[in-house]
Each structure stands twice: as structure tokens, then as C-alpha cells.
Amino acid sequence: MFNRQEAKGKADTHQSLTDRIRRKYDLTPSVSTILALTTLFFVVFLIYPLLYVFKEAFWIENTFDMTYFKLMVTDPNIRELVINSFKVGAMVTLVTSVVSLPLAYFLTRYRYPGRNMLRSIILIPMIMPPFVGAIGMKKFFGLYGSVNMILVKLNLLERSADPIDWLGGGFWGVVMLSALHLYPIMYLNIVAALANVDPSLEEAAENLGASRFQIFRRITLPLMMPGYFAGAILVFIWAFTDLGTPLMFGYKDVIAVKIFRQVTEANTNPMGYALVVLIIVLTALAFYASKRWTGSKNYEMLGRGHVTSREVDANWKMRSIIYLFIGGLTFMALLPHISIILNSLTPDASQWWLSILPQSWTLAHYVETFTHSDTLPSILNSLKYSIFSTLLALLVGIVVSYLLTRKRLPFQNLLDAVAMLPLALPGVAIAFGYMGSFADTTLLLRHLPDGLVSVLDPRQNPTFLLIISYAVRRLPYMLRSIYAGLQQTSVTYEEASQNMGATPIRTLYKITLPLVIANILAGAILVFSFSMLEVSDSLILAMQDKHYPITKAIWALSQRHDHGAYVASALGVVGMLILIACLLGAGRVLGGKLGEIFRI
């Protein structure tokens, strides 16, 4: 009798705890099911691959082993990889800083004709990854490229003399092209930081007799440091973990390329996993150091709603400086695009050799791009992967953003952090994690039916994992876009719909989603466009010709000794045009300038 009463008391206590949880959180059966499925998605396709990487790096032959991490310290070859990667990241960050600081100042603090047009032009480098532009830039800055031929033509360099190595063995080529691609990210963060600087502080310093340079150095620059470091850390991590650009320039002594070379040994050599762990840890430390450094300082300013802008009209001298600076930068930024177009129109190597420009032109490579068995399937594959990854990112993005904005959930902040985590993770880390964790020798796949194994194993068919990886990598763009739309939409419309008897699903379909359709379309276009030219996942996961997307086909073609590089250039131009159309479409959907969709 006593045991029965005790059991009844425990059941009542459990029921009371369940009721309290349900009252505190919106955990209806349908919400609980959706949350469970969303959690399962992130666990299987984000958390599990990362945990698998750590397990393979530290747990070797059923024992905890730090051997491969010790090699990073003791082996000079591994140390060189780390040092070179740091040099690339640091140099790209320095160059983008030197370019972006005056650029942001010129475009936000001075008024002059054509300023709005210049704000859009400087974002042009974002329409093509440096991986693609590297093919053409080698024609411009190679040992016998256009630049050296111009110097010979001007009698500044003897034809018989050793040519100048502008690419520095590949290092300076990587730095130059990465900086030209990434400076808009730095610029947008600096612009956002400048907008948060209280102009009254600068006016006070000006009234005390400080020059504009002194005001910038002593007042403006210190106050914009949080925004600057946000951009700097993104640029550093991107350059530090970039795979495509070093690969195309033949600069192989960096961590990302070494990881790429280890793909074929993913299940026999733990070094690849150890290197992936290294870049994940270094990336996390970089974010932590940035947050710690900026968080240790006080950047608070008085409210500035009543203060007018610090913009001034530029005189003719300042206008000349601004036009020269931005014009020169724009020309450099356009060089990769110009070079890839010229290369795609060159018949063969003999027509662009020891000359400034190609000696003849052809459209044959574009014809081949849309007819050849090596190129047309890659375009169709990229379209297929990108469309389905966009639909998947759209589904997950709507679910997660709706849960975060409309429901009270346990561990709500954790769900938000996990969904945004891919933004901070290097693409090469996620791709290598997929390759290892879903390969045919893993414990997970050994107990699955053969049909399901062939779907999950990238060595047999990477289609499913490419779609998943594209969606996971670009999910933060979709989530941030839809989340912002839901935050700006009043919940009273949804409450009115449900009060009239509509179900939550019908309300979501008929009321909520139509109100945020512009945000949905903008996020979808961004996910699709960046998936079309995704580099790291494509290079690592696509291992058979028939499954190559555009970027892997460009890489494979560039390695051919015939006219492959020229067909690869034409394929790159096709991808660039698709991306331009997508970004212009996103800007049109948002009803604002193209640059607005990239603000951080």
C-alpha cells in the first residue's frame, strides 16, 4: 500500500513538473516534434561531423593520442604550413585594412558627385570568388604575362633579362586576389562602425583646434575599433582557411591545401583530422581574442539622435584624391574579371604568349562550355545542387526563425548559436568532416542498408551531402534574412487569424510568410547564388567527373595541359554572370542598393 502511494506521489510530482514546463514554454506536441526534428538535423549534419573530426584526431587505435599534434610543433614541414597560413591571413587583413579605412572615410564623410554610384561599384569583387579569377590573373602577372610585357614595351625591362615574379611564387598572388575579394567585407563593417561614432565628440575636438587627421587618429579610430575588428576577424579567417585561391596559384604550403591533399587518406591517416581540428581551434581563438580585446575596453557614447551628420562637401583637391583612389582601386578590383573574360576569348596558349593582349579571339570555348560532356553536366549539377540546397535552407530557416521569434523554448539561445555556427566555421573543416564521418568505413554507415549507404557516402555519390553542405554553410544568410523580417512583423495579425479559427500552420502559410516574402526571396537568392560557386565543399566532396559542380570542373579543367584553362575561364564567366543576375535580383527584391544585402 505504501509503495503504491509513493509511486502515485512520484507520478503526480512528474506531472506537476511537466505542467510547469509547458506553462513556461510553448511546448505543444506539434512544436515539440518540429523542435526535435530541427535538433536532429543539426546534430546529424553539423555536430556529428565536427565531433567525428575531433574523435579521429585524438582517439587513435582505441587510445587517446596527441602524436599528430606534437608533429605540428616538431615537424618543420607542418610548422611551415601553419606559419604560411598565418602570413597569408595577416597580410590579407593588413592590405584590406589599408584600403578599406580611407575608402570608408571618403564614402561616408564627404559629399561629391557620383558617390552613390561609387558605393555600388566597390562591391563588384564580391560577384566572383578569387578561385576563379586566379586563372586569368596568372596571365596578367605571370613571368611572361601582360605586366612584364608592358615593361618590355616601355624599355623598363630587357626582354633577355629574368622577368619579374609579381606573384612571389604564388604568395603575393594569393594575397592580392584575396584582398581584392575581401575588402568589401572590411569596408561594410567599418562603415557600420563609423555610423555609430558620436559626431559631437569629433566636433568637440575640432572646436579645440584638432586637425582632421588628429580627430581621426585620436577620436574616430579608437571608437570604431569594435566594428573594425569584426571585419578584420572575418577577413583573417577567410584568408587563413581559403582553399581555392592557393590551390589555383600553386601555393601548396598552407593548411587548407594540405587538408585537401589528405582527403584520399581520410580513413587511414589522422593527420588530416588533426589539421582540421587545428584550424577550428585557431578560428575559435581568433574570435575569442577579438571579443576579449574589444570587450575589455569601454566604447560607450552619449545618445546622438539630435546630432547632424559630419558629412562635408569635398573641395576640388579632395575630390581629385577621392576619384583617383577609388578609381585605381576599382580598376584593380576589375582586373580578375577582365582577365578571366580575356582568357575565355583566347583561342589557345600560343595566341597570348609574350604579348600584352591576346593576338586573336574566339567564342569556341563558350560553345564547348554548353556542349562538352565535361562542362555542361557541371552547370546542370550546380543548378541542381543549388536549387535543392536553397529549398532545404529555406525550410530550416523558416522553422528556426519562427521558433526563435514566435515561441518560448528551452535553450533558445543555444538553437540560435548552433544555426549561426557555420558562419564562423571554415568550409574546409565542414567538408572534411563530412568526407570522414559519412565515408564507407565509419561506424554509422556500417549498420545501414546498402541503398542508404550509397546516398550518404560521398565516395559513391556526393549529391546528397553536397546539397546538405551547401544548405548548412549558407543557412545563416537565410536565417538572418527571415529572422529580421519576422521581428519587424507584428504578431497581432497571426493572433487575429488564430482567433478566427485558423490553425497555426494555416496562419503561417496565409498570413506570416506573405508578410516576409521579400526577406525570404532575398535570403533564397543569396543562398542559391553563393551555392553556385561554393569552393571548399565542391572540391573536397565531389570526387567523380559526373558529379562535378562548376567550381570542381573549373579546377579539373585548369589542370589540363591543352586548352582546358581557357574552357575553365569560359565556365567561370558563366558562373559569374549567374551570380551577378542573382545579386541584382536580391537587391531589387529588397528595394535597396545591392550593398545593403551584404551589411554585417
Image (cartoon, rainbow, N blue to C red):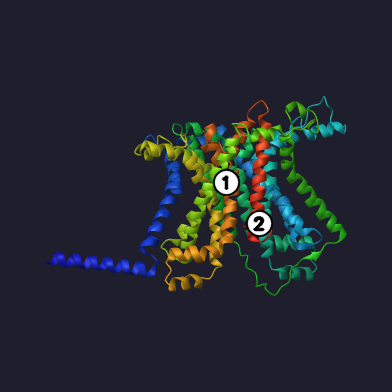
CB contact under 8 Å: marks 2 and 1: no
> Please, which residue is most extreme toward the bottom here?
306
Image quadrant where residue 314 sits: bottom right
Circle 1: residue type: Ser
Q: Is residue 222 above or below residue 93?
A: below
SS for callout 2: helix
**How many residues crowd around disc 2 within 10 Å: few (fewer than 14), some, or many (20 or more)?**
some
Q: Which mark, residue 587?
A: 2
Quarter of the figure with the N terminus:
bottom left
The percent coordinates of residue 528 (x first, y second) are 58, 49
The percent coordinates of residue 561 (x first, y second) are 66, 25
Q: Which mark, residue 261?
A: none
Q: Is residue 440 visible?
A: yes
Quarter of the figure with the C terminus:
bottom right
SS for callout 1: helix
**How many residues crowd around disc 1 within 10 Å: few (fewer than 14), some, or many (20 or more)?**
many
